[in-house]
Amino acid sequence: GTDDIVDSITGMDKFKLNEYDESIEVPWVEIETSVKKLPDDGNLVQLPIDKLAANNPPLELFVDVKNILLSDKDHVARSWFVVRSEQGVYNGTYEGIRCATGEYKVYAYANPARSKPLRVVKMPKWRKVRKGSYREEMMRDYFCDYTSPKSQEALSRLEYIEVDYLKRLRGSY
């Protein structure tokens, strides 16, 4: 019939047209990440995060806006994040955010008050971001457009966030 004519013209049978060839997929490969220095306090900009502000005592999240790295090879956004409290608590993490899978990875910890202020994680692992966590809010509001990271241009605009304006906009005042 006509199928035989099409097969003879195209050289393909109808079964091969419907088969998916997994060998053409390119596996995801993470780029090598090394952390050599602490975040620069002068580059830290506060990201308003409702989950952290609701804590007792409230916590604030900062990002090192001058050192956000968005790799076009593995599509992971990397930067220093610092959580602070009014009582002086300071916890820094150098993290990768993988929007495609909803995961994060901590590459290093920072605390300038410790004898060893920078602690690099020997074998960091990707972890799922918990629903309802501050990381989920951070990814959704600032770093990801669904399953893709925001553009480098959009991420560089985080430098201009005005916390007081955003708080008023959200009714936090």
Image (tube, grey):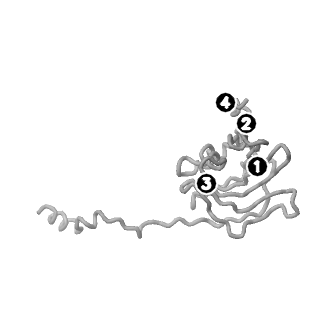
Using a 10 Å C-alpha cutoff, classify the residue at mark 2 as few (fewer than 14 neighbours), some (14 to 19) or many (20 or more).
Answer: few
Q: Earlier in the sequence, mark 4 or mark 1?
A: 1
Q: CA distance from mark 3 to mark 4?
A: 27 Å
Residue topped by disc 3:
129
Element type at mark 1 = strand
Please indicate whether residue 52 sits to the left or right of residue 13 in the image: right
Q: Earlier in the sequence, mark 2 or mark 1?
A: 1
| Percent position of residue 9, x then y | 19, 65
Q: Are marks 3 and 4 in contact (CB under 8 Å)?
A: no
Q: Earlier in the sequence, mark 3 or mark 1?
A: 1
Mark in the foreground, 3 or 4: 3
Give the residue at x 65% y 67%. Answer: 32
Q: CA distance from mark 4 to mark 1?
A: 22 Å
Amino acid at circle 4: Leu
Residue topped by disc 1:
83
Amino acid at circle 1: Val
Q: Earlier in the sequence, mark 2 or mark 3?
A: 3
Residue topped by disc 4:
169
Residue topped by disc 2:
163
Quarter holding residue 162 = top right
Q: Earlier in the sequence, mark 3 or mark 4?
A: 3
Mark in the foreground, 2 or 3: 3
Element type at mark 2 = helix
Give the residue at x 22% y 69%. Answer: 11
